[in-house]
Amino acid sequence: MQEYVGMRLLLEKQIPTDLVKAMEEVDNVSNWVAKELKQGHEFLGRFLTGFMEAINNAIIHGNKNDPDKQVRILVAVVDDDHVILEVEDEGNGFDYETVLKRSGVIDREAESGRGIFLMQKMADEVEFFNGGRGVRLRFALDKGV
C-alpha cells in the first residue's frame, strides 16, 4: 500500500480465487464502505462497478482462476475526501502501458479489454502497480450526502 498523508485504513483482507465468493465479498464490502462513509447510491454504483471489474481482472486474468491463489483487497480513506481501493493478484502481471494506450478503443465482441475501460469510467483515477499485478482506484466521496 502506498502511504498517503491523512490516510485511514478501513479494510485489508485476502479473498479466494472464486468468482462467486468474490462477487459476494465485493457486494458486502461495497455496501459496508458506502454505509460507513455515509455515501449514497451514486458513489455505491461507481465503487461497486469499479471493484467488480478489478476483482474480475485479478481472478480471471491475473490468477487464471487458480483456487490456490488469493486476491488482496485494501480500502482506505484519504484526507476525508476520497477512497482508495487496491486489488492485487498473485499472477504474473501484464503490460498495462500497452493496454492503456488502446483502452479508449473497445471491441465489444472481444472476450476481454472492457474491464480497464469501465474502471476508468467509474473511478476518478486508475493506477497500476507491482508490474500490473495490482490496481489502485481512487473514488471521490460525495459531499453533503
Image (cartoon, rainbow, N blue to C red):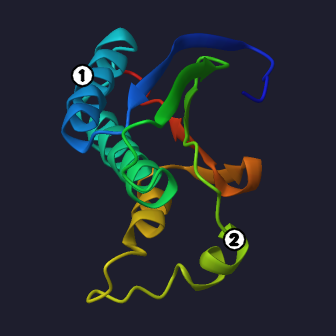
Q: Within the image, what quadrant is residue 142 found in?
A: top left
Task: Give the residue type that dot 2 points to.
Answer: Asp
Tell me if label 1 and label 2 are in contact, CB under 8 Å: no
Residue 95 is tagged as 2
Where is residue 124 drawn, in percent x and y? Answer: 55, 50
Quadrant location of the N terminus? Answer: top right
- Give the side of residue 133 with respect to residue 59, left or right: right
| Above or below, 28 relative to 106 | above
User: Element at badge 1?
Assistant: helix
Question: In front here: 39 or 113?
Answer: 113
- Give the side of residue 74 with respect to residue 113, left or right: right
Residue identified by numbered label 1: 28
Where is residue 45 drawn, in percent x and y? Answer: 27, 42
Front: mark 1 or 2: 2
Which residue lies at the image location 39% right of the left edge and 42% below the top edge? Answer: 51
| Above or below, 124 relative to 115 | above
User: Element at badge 2?
Assistant: loop
Name the N-terminal-most of marks 1 and 2: 1
Q: Residues within 10 Å of mark 2 (few under 14, many from 20)?
A: few
Which residue lies at the image location 32% right of the left edge and 22% below the top edge? Answer: 29
Residue 94 is tagged as none
Q: CA distance from mark 1 to mark 2?
A: 31 Å
| Above or below, 133 relative to 43 | below
- Give the side of residue 99 with respect to residue 34, left or right: right
- Give the side of residue 42 with respect to residue 112, left or right: left
Quadrant location of the C terminus? Answer: top left
Q: Within the image, what quadrant is residue 78 found in?
A: top right
Task: Give the residue type that dot 1 points to.
Answer: Asn
| Above or below, 100 relative to 105 | above
**Can the viewer see residue 97 in this picture?**
yes
Question: In front here: 40 or 99?
Answer: 99
